[in-house]
Image (cartoon, helix red, strand yellow):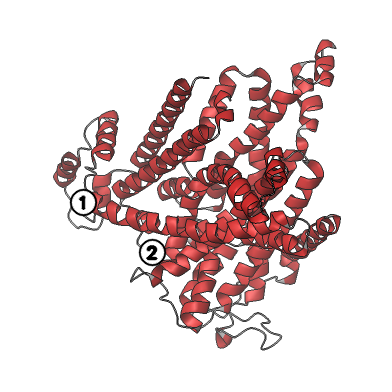
């Protein structure tokens, strides 16, 4: 089993470092931002030359450049939305678990509602009204996902509240704020980190789905979901337009899932995040 | 907690959730602007009288809560009213809902057919190469964007091999690719559940007793262990129902499947909000109902959790 765990870690890390590194350096690697059109080389097949190693799309734009540049949107949305949800969820979860009462009621009822309204449906309703956009998707994801973190933290707080070291801190007369953030939170971090890693992966998938549906990122900005939507009409004649961005999503999400799985075994042996 | 009060509590909770979701959807959709203006946005020479007549006809000049009450009454009685552009909503919904449920159930069957045997194999051969392969495959399955998997299937089976129709609903063969697409995604999570719960159950005392009685391996696994681990699987499937519906929306669009997701996306494109409002509310009702049903079944199947 340990051999397998190490494999998970190494494979996940390699995928994320390679893809994340290329995306981070995309400004240097592809200064044109994947927008340059080579109209003489439209729909070039992949692996036929060094100019366009992964081929070109119907407008003659380089697929490799667009895949690397398009990763920016995915990583940005995935990371920022997960961070936002972590921060809000942590604060509400700490308050609900520590003080119980109305905070707790509010949190649990909100969680019930959230369970009944899958993200895609919520996003469809809201985006139909306010229109698509990068910032809106991130806000929606935060609104939809903070509850998971709040529930997780609340659970940890409920059990940690009774722990001797917390009671010791209380009898010491420490203010609640210090007990919550200095003593309880550090002990509840493990599951939080795991959930956040898996959520970055999940949010990358969600963003690409929404953009594919035309409810996400501006179609003029290169993004993996947008490339898949563009390529759909050329699936018969130029499947590579669709294959490579999909592979990029898959490998990124797989890398994050591998790391999350490995982290789960390291940080959460009791399975709070299962 | 006695059974009746537990049931009552869960039913009240479910009712509360439904009211909250439908109120949210109805209210949010009112924020989009004046439906009368939207309906006439492509006609020339619109007079204020035209707008007033349409508002009157749609009942939009009544207070919000009255309209909301009407909408809920309509959901309960099946009188779903009219869309902006496509006539009565009820026949649209009944066709789409049937198509979506057909797809959902077929996908579920596909996923169970794959995940149960593979999960049992992984659990009974723990740590073997096959077990680890199953784990990697299930992780890989979770990493596909489901619509991309659908497009790849179209590429292979429709474009290249020409075995299956690429889209629409022309017969049973139309069901294969969408059901496999969603089934594969479901399989990834189900596999993990089957494997872990089987491992738990196989190490419990009643399995040891069954083995001590001299029952064959097959009888132990299929008669005793599988039955007990299926409780966890059913609960999990219930919890997953919401995201299954969410995933269906996108996959339906890829295959042009005439279900609720396609209906919703078309409604968004045309800004036909009465349809969108009804579709989302009905899906929410379904999800809440399934979760409620799973909770109650779970309680009946496993007496230990009644005193939660």
Instruction: Give the residue pinned by disc 2.
Output: B257
From this view, report whether residue B122 is shown above or below residue B26.
below
> Which of B227/B171 is in front?
B227
Q: Earlier in the sequence, mark 2 or mark 1?
A: 1
How far apart are the alpha carbons under marks 2 and 1? 21 Å
Q: Chain of mark 2?
A: B
> Which of B132/A194 is in front?
B132
Q: Position of residue B22 (x, y in %)?
A: 37, 36
Q: Position of residue A156 (x, y in %)?
A: 71, 29
From this view, report whether residue B59 is shown above or below residue A183.
below
Quarter-of-image position of residue A157: top right
Q: Judging from the image, what secondary structure is the residue with disc 1 in?
A: loop
Quarter-of-image position of residue A161: top right
Q: Position of residue B140 (x, y in %)?
A: 66, 62
From this view, report whether residue A119 is shown above or below residue B92.
above
> Which of B66/B200 is in front?
B200
Q: Judging from the image, what secondary structure is the residue with disc 2 in?
A: loop
Name the residue located 46 percent from the left edge and 75 percent from the top edge: A233
Q: With A115 as the anchor, is B263 left or right in this view?
A: left
Q: Chain of mark 1?
A: B
Quarter containing the C terminus of chain A: top right
Q: With B255 as the anchor, is A164 left or right in this view?
A: right
Quarter containing the N terminus of chain A: bottom right
Instruction: Give the residue pinned by disc 1.
Output: B88
């Amino acid at each position: 089993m340990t051999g397998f765990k190490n494999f998970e870690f190494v494979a996940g890390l390699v995928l994320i470092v390679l893809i994340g590194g290329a995306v981070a350096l995309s400004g240097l690697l592809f200064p044109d931002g994947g927008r340059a059109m080579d109209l003489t080389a439209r729909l070039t097949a992949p692996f036929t030359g060094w100019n366009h190693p992964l081929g070109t799309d119907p407008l003659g734009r380089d697929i490799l450049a667009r895949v690397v540049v398009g990763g920016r949107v995915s990583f940005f949305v995935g990371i920022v939305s997960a961070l936002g949800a972590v921060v809000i969820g942590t604060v509400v979860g700490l308050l609900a678990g520590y003080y119980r009462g109305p905070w707790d009621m509010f949190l649990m009822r909100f969680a019930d509602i959230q369970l009944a309204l899958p993200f895609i449906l919520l996003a469809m309703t809201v985006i139909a009204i306010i229109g698509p956009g990068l910032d809106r998707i991130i806000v929606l994801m935060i609104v939809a996902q903070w509850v998971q973190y709040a529930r997780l933290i609340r659970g940890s707080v409920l059990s940690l509240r009774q722990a001797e070291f917390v009671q010791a801190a209380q009898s010491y007369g420490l203010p609640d704020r210090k007990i919550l953030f200095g003593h309880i939170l550090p002990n509840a971090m493990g599951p939080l980190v795991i959930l956040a890693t898996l959520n970055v992966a999940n949010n990358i998938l969600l963003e690409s789905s929404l953009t594919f549906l035309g409810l996400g990122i501006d179609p003029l900005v290169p993004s993996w979901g947008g490339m898949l939507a563009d390529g759909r009409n050329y699936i018969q004649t130029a499947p590579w337009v669709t294959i490579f961005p999909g592979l990029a999503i898959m490998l990124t999400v797989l890398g994050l899932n591998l790391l999350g799985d490995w982290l789960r075994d390291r940080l959460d042996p009791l399975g709070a995040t299962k | 907690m006695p059974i009746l009060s537990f049931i009552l509590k869960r039913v009240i909770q479910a009712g509360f959730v439904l009211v909250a979701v439908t109120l949210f959807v109805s209210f949010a959709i009112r924020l989009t602007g004046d439906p009368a203006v939207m309906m006439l946005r492509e006609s020339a020479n619109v007079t204020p009288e035209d707008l007033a007549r349409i508002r009157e006809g749609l009942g939009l000049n009544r207070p919000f809560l009255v309209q909301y009450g009407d909408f809920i009454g309509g959901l309960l009685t099946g009188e779903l009213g009219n869309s902006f552009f496509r006539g009565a909503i009820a026949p649209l919904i009944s066709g789409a809902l049937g198509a979506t449920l057909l797809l959902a159930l077929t996908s579920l069957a596909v996923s169970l057919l794959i995940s149960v045997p593979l999960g049992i194999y992984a659990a009974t051969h723990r740590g073997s190469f096959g077990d680890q392969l199953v784990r990697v495959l299930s992780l890989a399955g979770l990493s596909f964007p489901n619509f991309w998997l659908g497009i790849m299937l179209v590429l292979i089976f429709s474009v290249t091999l020409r075995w299956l129709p690429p889209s629409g609903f022309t017969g049973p063969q139309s069901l294969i690719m969408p059901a496999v697409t969603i089934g594969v995604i479901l399989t990834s999570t189900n596999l993990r559940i089957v494997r872990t719960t089987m491992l738990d159950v196989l190490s419990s005392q009643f399995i040891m007793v069954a083995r001590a009685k001299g029952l064959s391996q097959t009888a132990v696994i299929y008669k005793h262990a599988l039955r007990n681990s299926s409780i966890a699987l059913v609960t999990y499937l219930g919890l997953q129902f919401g995201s299954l519906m969410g995933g269906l929306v996108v996959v339906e669009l890829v295959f042009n499947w005439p279900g609720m997701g396609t209906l919703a996306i078309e409604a968004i494109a045309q800004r036909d909000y009465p349809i969108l409002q009804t579709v989302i509310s009905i899906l929410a009702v379904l999800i809440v109902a399934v979760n409620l049903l799973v909770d109650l079944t779970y309680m009946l199947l496993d007496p230990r959790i009644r005193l939660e």
